[in-house]
Amino acid sequence: MATEQRPFHLVVFGASGFTGQFVTEEVAREQVATEQGSRLPWAVAGRSQEKLQQVLEKAALKLGRPSLSSEVGIIICDVCNPASLDEMAKKAVLVLNCVGPYRFYGEPVVKACIENGTSCIDICGEPQFLELMHAKYHEKAAEKGVYIIGSSGFDSIPADLGVLYTRKQMNGTLTAVESFLTIHSGCEGLCIHDGTWKSAIYGFGDKGTLRTLRSTLCLKPVPIVGSKLKRRWPVSYCKELNSYSIPFLGSDMSVVKRTQRYLHENLQESPVQYAAYVTVGGITSVIKLMFAGLFFLFFVKFSIGRHLLIKFPWLFSFGYFSKQGPTQKQMDGSSFTMTFFGQGYSHGFCPEKNKPNIRICTQVKGPEAGYVTTPIAMVQAAMTLLNDTSDLPKGGGVFTPGAAFSRTKLIDRLNQHGIEFSVISSSEV
């Protein structure tokens, strides 16, 4: 990627949004920690000069760097104005897109970046958008030599890179992985922001479009190596974690499967089967969550139901919604653990005729998922893209995090910034 002709290496688009302000702060923190001669010129972009200036001043105060606001560029840009998107893209080597829901606002940014030879990273957790962008723009991005990398936040870097980490740590061939997400909340409880709430509503309400998209692609099934991974019941008990679990309905399954397809088809790596779950505690929590989940899934099926969910979120989110998003105390008291249980075969052990003879357990731990882990993951993905270009897929394209960063040092970077990957146990059966 050529950088000399562009005034900014990084541009945070949507910097004055709720998540964007945390991403801006994380970029500033990363640049403050970098030696003077190695700092990258960067900018923030959005519709309001005043709001962007306020975000920079807030970050400057928090980081104790009064000169920050004068060191960062400001670009006025509106996602509804294609010309302004082109102007932003022309000034950047890499755009960090924080403007969602992406199903409504993401494609114009992707299009502008590709047309102007600019790479782009987003934090989308919407499988329909992610898979559609790959179908429409992968070849165009490859022709331009730029990288469009989606889901580079909590959705879905811990899951996607967690599977790759588990594969690397196994002394043999990893064939299947189950992940279990556990969210830890402090005494202040949990909370989601308005944008996250809306993305969930539209995502679950439009699953039919995703099924149609997948059917039109006519993709060849990825082969199953070894024993087929059996799916758990909708409510199952995980004895290792002493907790009930339900299927995780986020983007992790979609992202990990796309990564495994890429690694198999392009790098001839043995594909890994994957299933994602979230722990919910005891039986009382299961009953409460089943009621809330069924209620939510029923309403998102109908346009009037989606309208009610959006207009009166506090009536339907069971105390987890706030227009202002979580407080600092809520974020400070929250964290996550994602536990991976993998199985496979030792070297020389035939997977066609035998059951798996190796088990491995790994974990990814990190701070609050939505607004602390996500900015860290996004910014470290950006730094990896800018600094480890020789280890990226050749030629550019539209990628998942695992496909783009499988041969880079992103996991090492995340470990150094509080998102920890570790092996819990490994044994032959």
Image (spheres, rainbow, N blue to C red):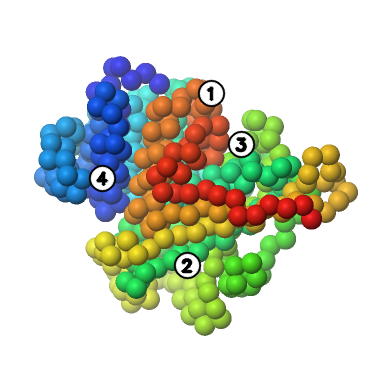
Which badge, 3 or 1, is on the more N-terminal residue? 3
Q: Which mark is residue 301?
A: 2
Q: Nearer the viewer, residue 228 or 343?
A: 343
Residue highlighted by disc 3: 262
Q: Please say if 233 is above or below 87.
A: below
Q: Nearer the viewer, mark 1 or mark 4?
A: 4
Q: Which mark is residue 394?
A: 1
For label 3, the SS is helix
For label 1, the SS is loop
Find the distance from the CA under tag 1 to the CA under tag 4.
31 Å
Residue highlighted by disc 4: 25
Amino acid, disc 2:
Lys
Q: How many marks?
A: 4
Q: Nearer the viewer, mark 4 or mark 2?
A: 4
For label 2, the SS is loop
Which badge, 4 or 2, is on the more N-terminal residue? 4
Callout 4: few (<14), some (14-19), or many (20+) C-alpha neighbours within 10 Å? many
Find the distance from the CA under tag 2 to the CA under tag 1.
42 Å
**Residue 321 sits in quarter:** bottom left
Amino acid, disc 1:
Lys
Q: Quadrant of the N terminus?
A: top left
Callout 1: few (<14), some (14-19), or many (20+) C-alpha neighbours within 10 Å? few
Find the distance from the CA under tag 3 to the CA under tag 1.
13 Å
For label 4, the SS is helix
